[in-house]
């Protein structure tokens, strides 16, 4: 019959839109990892001795650890000695003082990514920190933020200018030996963002970081630390892209969030690292440790992520709910298509009384994509009246895709209420026919249904990010329609 | 090597050539292979994903007597009517410490095509049928069961046979001097379009320190239907390892109930393989833990063919210092399209020191499926609680009524009325249901 | 406009339609009645292009075009609209958003310029009034959490926005109370004109009190066994379908 659905193969595969390479001179260290390399990185960044000591301690721990194998992903062994642990655009040597001084090639990169800095500066009022390969290139809006007492700078600057804050909080959420990749990051991280919101300050604008891996054979190991002091509030956005490369590149970041009494942090990510080509060659290994410490009473941390990129994603943004009445939230959309593999989810560890958590996870698997939700909800003995609600839904597109759900629920307090729901299904033929009958093409109809499926998560994103996320999802899904 | 493995190795070496079928080289070889597999499989620790919530070191640290013959005279005074066992059928087969007990068993007239055979006689008869069921396990305990196997029951139903009256197989671990390890075995072979109802009870006599390693294999051939009930009751000194393997062919159905009431450490794995289209499996389960008991239910449903269905409904209640675990996995293999799978794990946590861990998993490699699971851990519904109290029912009774109602859903659909009533009675006892009987009489 | 010629349709080797003939001219309203299982819904679905039916013989043309060669959205582009018996719920997809995509899809198909957001909203506002649908439903996810009556009204509302040339109402009256039935009838009557045709598939006569058809056909055993004017519908209401079965079996 004429109205048979078009087969997957009939569609032209959509190319990765952010997959261009910026041709600027790089200042890199030759591949390999040892104490000398760590000292080189530390010296290059002009770090104080305590920072170097901390790195070396992490390195020693790391050498005694083994790579975790429990995730539902498959990949050949990573040769960590073949990676260059420091790569910076050359012009960074004499760092830019204003946007005009930034390498125009670099600015073009961000333009191609759809981040016109000037425009954002004017219209959106978003302060942007850009991390290009390993170093932070430029932080906009520094002055305006400084008026409010907000510190938003590159991690390197923070080490120099705010050592007391860094020393106090670095590693206090994700200890150096937390896991293999976190230990590696602690030893070799090159840059990242640092945010401090002082007491009772509502950060006057959204803060944003764009990460991009550009150079060949580099790993990106950024470190982000956000501290929301008592009564403060901040919304932080993170975007990621990488050029197309045949070889796999490693991204092992660590993000630590600290929310003190009555503070609130909203952390949103749109991750679009290069996923590899349609045969599964190349792509980013995205092995990230993100954790929030809801240390204070009534504190709240909300993670929202839209994960469309990376060959492999291994990522569990988590909340440790220590403060009484603290709240943790996790909203996630993860897409795995072609040969992408995602093992992502969250951990909600309830320690304080009346702590609440919500988990909404939407997984989409297309082609050979394998998508796993892995989540832990732990109610500790002392966590009286803790509440958790988890909903994780999977959508399958194509008969070679896979969707997996691995939730762990551990309850040690009898006043807890924990509820977990999960479902897996394909897009229903009824829905598809309904929309097509109204005159909508099958591809648009699928996009519409998928976006509807993800709506609960998208509505948690700041407006401009939500639009970007929807667009990204549509682009990523093109050509995978069965 | 662990104390358990050491002592079993010694006992096995001493006894393997005296066990049933010792004159048959292929059976002896099978036992040796099975025992090697047990020895070669590392002891599960909480680092193993499948044993994350259940620490069985206490089992491995104990020396159990496994293979010595018990003498009938030890149990002369034992009468079934003295034991808290349900009575609902004229067909009762009793095993005492692995040995078929003729005195306590009573099998009425069986319909044509139904055959009950002790596994001991099958081993002695060099029956090739039995050998087929002995190997190929991927975990240690089923292999151990085959290695040490002395007896059990084999239920065979010829094609088209309909066995309406239930068959009750009772495994008792009576009081012995030294800690005992028993190997209980039940095999049900439901040939094409046959039907049967099986009840399997494991009962540990008060105070006996023991470990039961039970293995049940159910085959529902094309169009067959097997209804299986498993009841396990134990004291804190009694440990229990149970494995159920159900193989469900085209258009066949297996429905199984697993009731676990106590035990020091009880670990029950229910595995169902749906290997023909139209196969259907229903898994029901209930556990109640108290004191320092630990019960771990694992289910694994593998949809290997298109058009297969599974429904799982498990409930758990943890009281006292008890810990309850549910880990259910639904696996839908590639090309197993048009699969429907539902799984529900609901749990009540009633005491300060109790714990519930639940891990409902989906692993799906086909797209045209409809799979869902839900898990809850919580307390009694406060609205219902308030409602009852506003009607003048005291707090304790209200709690008992609601706890009973929560648990009784599981045996609620059991068609053997006397068995269902007996289970409900057991639940009432365990919910400390003061005044509950009166309430029920008023219904 | 619509010509169905000797249509034979099976599902999984079971013959549902068995040589059905029907001609609908512009501006006409045809009612198709018949007992349960007579193939009424199959006919609606096949005209709209639903998958899963084997068309073993016959054809359907619409304004001279072979409908069977077109995808559902292309048929919609040609002007075919199906009001579903069971309008499907689509969580998260906004009703009006979908409608805008649909309308612009149709306009694009017809080579017309797309409507911008302002013009579209004007149109929606006007139609909301004329159909009498609750504003609140417009911005909810499609049919999600709607009552039965709300779903059916939403179908008529969508029809009024999309302005089809041929509207097929598949048991739109089922499960409606009198008020909703009247609202559906009013909505359809407003859209009646000399260019637009309707095929009203129904089990009961009661919707035809509100929408008076030009022709009434009785579908039984996969073919039209009797045709007439509105009086046939009244006769069916009085006598049921059984007498027809007896009659057809003897013919």
Image: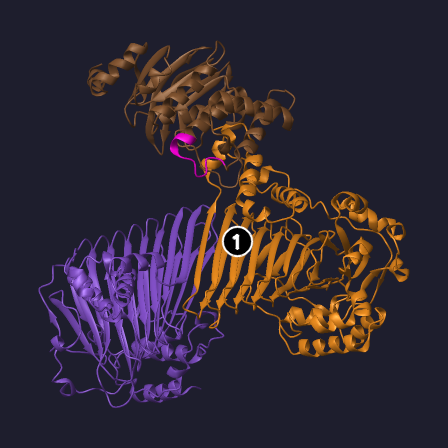
Quadrant into which the N terminus of chain B falls = bottom left
Region of the chain picked out in magenta, as a range: C142-150
**Quarter assignment of residue B235:** bottom left
Image colour for chain B is: purple
Question: Is there any visible trace of residue C207 in the rendered image?
Answer: yes
**Quarter assignment of residue A230:** bottom right
Q: Chain for mark 1?
A: A
Is A121 located above or below residue A4 in the figure?
A: below
Q: Position of residue A113 (x, y in %)?
A: 75, 46
Q: Position of residue A75 (x, y in %)?
A: 61, 62
Image colour for chain C is: brown
**Name of the residue lying farthest toward the left:** B109
How many labels were placed on the picture? Answer: 1
Which residue is pictured at 15% across the width and 78% down the height? B101
Quadrant into which the C terminus of chain B falls = bottom left
Mark 1 residue element = strand
Queried whether the magenta region covers residue C238, the answer comes back as no
Q: Residues within 10 Å of mark 1 (few under 14, many from 20)?
A: many
């Amino acid at each position: 019959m004429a109205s048979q659905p078009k087969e997957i193969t009939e569609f032209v595969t959509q190319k990765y839109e952010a997959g261009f390479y910026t041709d600027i001179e790089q200042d890199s260290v030759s591949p390999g990892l040892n104490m000398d390399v760590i000292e080189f990185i530390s010296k290059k960044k002009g770090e104080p001795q305590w920072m170097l000591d901390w790195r070396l301690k992490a390195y020693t721990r790391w050498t005694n650890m083994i790579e975790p194998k429990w995730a539902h992903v498959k990949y050949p062994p990573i040769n960590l000695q073949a990676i260059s642990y420091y790569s910076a655009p050359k012009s960074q040597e004499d760092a830019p003082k204003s946007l005009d001084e930034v390498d125009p090639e670099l600015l073009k990169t961000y333009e191609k990514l759809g981040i016109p800095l000037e425009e954002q500066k004017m219209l959106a009022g978003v302060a942007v920190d850009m991390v290009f390969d390993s170093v932070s290139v430029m932080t906009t809006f520094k002055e305006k933020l400084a008026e409010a007492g907000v510190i938003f700078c590159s991690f390197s600057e923070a080490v120099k200018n705010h050592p007391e804050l860094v020393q106090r909080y670095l590693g206090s959420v994700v200890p150096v030996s937390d896991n293999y990749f976190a230990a590696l990051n602690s030893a070799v991280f090159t840059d990242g963002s640092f945010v401090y919101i002082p007491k009772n300050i509502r950060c006057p604008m959204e803060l944003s970081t764009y990460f991009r891996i550009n150079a060949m054979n580099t790993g990106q190991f950024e470190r982000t630390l956000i501290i929301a002091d008592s009564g403060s509030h901040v919304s932080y956005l993170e975007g990621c892209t990488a050029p197309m490369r045949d070889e796999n590149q490693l991204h092992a970041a660590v993000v630590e969030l600290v929310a003190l009494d009555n503070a609130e942090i909203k952390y949103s990510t749109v991750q679009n690292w290069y996923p590899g080509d349609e045969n599964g060659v190349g792509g980013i290994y995205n092995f990230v440790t993100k954790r929030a410490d809801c240390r204070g009473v009534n504190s709240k941390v909300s993670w929202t992520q839209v994960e469309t990129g990376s060959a492999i994603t291994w990522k569990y943004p988590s909340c440790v709910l220590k403060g009484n009445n603290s709240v943790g939230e996790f909203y996630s959309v993860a897409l795995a298509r072609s040969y992408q593999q995602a093992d992502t989810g969250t951990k909600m560890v309830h320690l304080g009384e009346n702590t609440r958590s919500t988990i909404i996870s939407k997984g989409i698997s297309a082609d050979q994509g394998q998508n796993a939700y892995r989540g832990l909800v732990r109610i500790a003995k002392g966590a009286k009246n803790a509440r958790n609600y988890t909903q994780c839904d999977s959508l399958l597109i194509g008969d070679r895709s896979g969707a997996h759900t691995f939730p762990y629920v551990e309850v040690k307090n009898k006043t807890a209420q924990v509820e977990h729901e999960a479902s897996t299904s394909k897009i229903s033929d009824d829905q598809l026919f309904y929309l097509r009958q109204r005159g909508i093409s099958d591809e648009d109809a699928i996009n519409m249904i998928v976006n509807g499926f993800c709506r609960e998560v998208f509505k948690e994103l700041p407006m401009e990010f939500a639009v970007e996320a929807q667009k990204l999802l549509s682009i990523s899904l093109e050509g995978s329609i069965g | 090597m662990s104390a358990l493995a050491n002592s079993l190795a010694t006992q096995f070496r001493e006894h393997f050539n005296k066990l049933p079928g010792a004159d048959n080289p292929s059976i002896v070889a099978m036992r040796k292979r099975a025992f090697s597999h047990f020895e070669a499989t590392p002891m599960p620790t909480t680092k193993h994903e499948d044993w994350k919530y259940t620490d069985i070191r206490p089992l491995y640290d104990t020396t159990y007597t496994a293979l010595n013959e018990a003498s009938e005279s030890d149990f002369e005074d034992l009468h079934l009517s003295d034991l808290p066992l349900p009575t609902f059928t004229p067909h009762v087969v009793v095993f005492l410490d692995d040995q078929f007990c003729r005195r306590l068993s009573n099998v009425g007239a069986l319909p044509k095509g139904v055959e009950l055979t002790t596994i001991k006689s099958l081993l002695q008869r060099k029956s090739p049928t039995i050998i087929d069921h002995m190997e190929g396990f991927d975990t240690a305990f089923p292999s151990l069961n085959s290695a040490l196997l002395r007896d059990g029951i084999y239920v065979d139903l010829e094609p088209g046979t309909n066995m309406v009256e239930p068959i009750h197989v009772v495994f008792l671990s009576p009081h012995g001097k030294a800690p005992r390890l028993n190997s209980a075995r039940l095999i049900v072979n439901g040939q094409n379009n046959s039907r049967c109802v099986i009840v399997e009870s494991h009962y540990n006599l008060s105070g006996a320190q023991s470990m039961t390693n039970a293995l049940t294999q159910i085959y529902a051939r094309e169009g067959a239907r097997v209804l299986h009930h498993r009841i396990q009751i134990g004291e804190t000194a009694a440990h229990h390892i149970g494995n159920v393997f159900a193989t469900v062919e085209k258009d066949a159905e297996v429905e199984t109930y697993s009731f676990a009431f106590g035990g020091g450490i009880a670990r029950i794995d229910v595995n169902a393989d749906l290997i023909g289209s139209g196969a259907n499996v229903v898994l029901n389960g209930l556990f109640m833990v108290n004191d320092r008991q630990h019960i771990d239910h694992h289910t694994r449903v593998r949809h290997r063919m298109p058009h297969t269905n599974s429904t799982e409904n498990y409930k758990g209640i943890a009281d006292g210092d008890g810990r309850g675990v549910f880990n259910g996995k639904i696996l839908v293999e590639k090309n197993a399209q048009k699969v429907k799978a539902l799984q529900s794990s609901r749990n009540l946590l009633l005491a300060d020191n109790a714990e519930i861990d639940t891990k409902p998993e989906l692993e799906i490699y086909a797209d045209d499926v409809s799979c869902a699971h839900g898990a809850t851990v919580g307390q009694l519904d406060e609205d219902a609680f308030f409602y009852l109290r506003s009607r003048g029912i005291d707090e304790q009774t209200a709690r008992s009524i609601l706890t009973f109602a929560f648990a009784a859903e599981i045996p609620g659909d059991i068609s053997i009325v006397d068995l269902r009533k007996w289970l409900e009675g057991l639940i009432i006892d365990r919910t400390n249901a003061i005044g509950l009987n009166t309430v029920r009489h008023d219904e | 406009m619509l010509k169905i010629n000797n249509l034979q349709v099976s599902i999984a080797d079971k013959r549902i339609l068995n040589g059905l003939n029907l001609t609908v001219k512009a501006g006409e309203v045809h009612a198709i009645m018949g007992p349960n299982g007579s193939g009424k819904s199959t006919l609606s679905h096949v005209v709209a292009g639903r998958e899963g039916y084997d068309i073993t013989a016959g054809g359907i043309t619409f304004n001279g075009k072979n409908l069977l060669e077109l995808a559902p959205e292309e048929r919609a582009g040609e002007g075919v609209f199906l009001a579903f018996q069971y309008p499907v719920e689509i969580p998260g997809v906004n009703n009006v958003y979908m409608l805008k995509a649909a309308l612009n899809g149709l306009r694009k198909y017809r080579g017309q310029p797309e409507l911008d957001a302002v013009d579209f909203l004007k149109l929606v506002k006007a139609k909301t009034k004329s159909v009498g649908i609750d504003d609140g439903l417009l911005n909810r996810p499609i049919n999600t959490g709607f009552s039965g009556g709300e779903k059916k009204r939403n179908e008529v509302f969508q029809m009024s926005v999309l302005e089809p040339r041929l509207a097929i109402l598949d048991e739109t009256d089922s499960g409606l109370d009198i008020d909703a039935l009247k609202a559906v009838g009013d909505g359809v009557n407003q859209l009646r004109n000399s260019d637009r045709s309707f095929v009203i598939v129904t089990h009961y006569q009661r919707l035809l009190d509100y929408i008076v058809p030009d022709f009434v056909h009785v579908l039984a055993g996969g073919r039209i066994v009797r045709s007439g004017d509105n009086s046939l519908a009244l006769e069916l209401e009085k006598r049921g379908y059984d007498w027809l079965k007896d009659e057809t079996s003897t013919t």
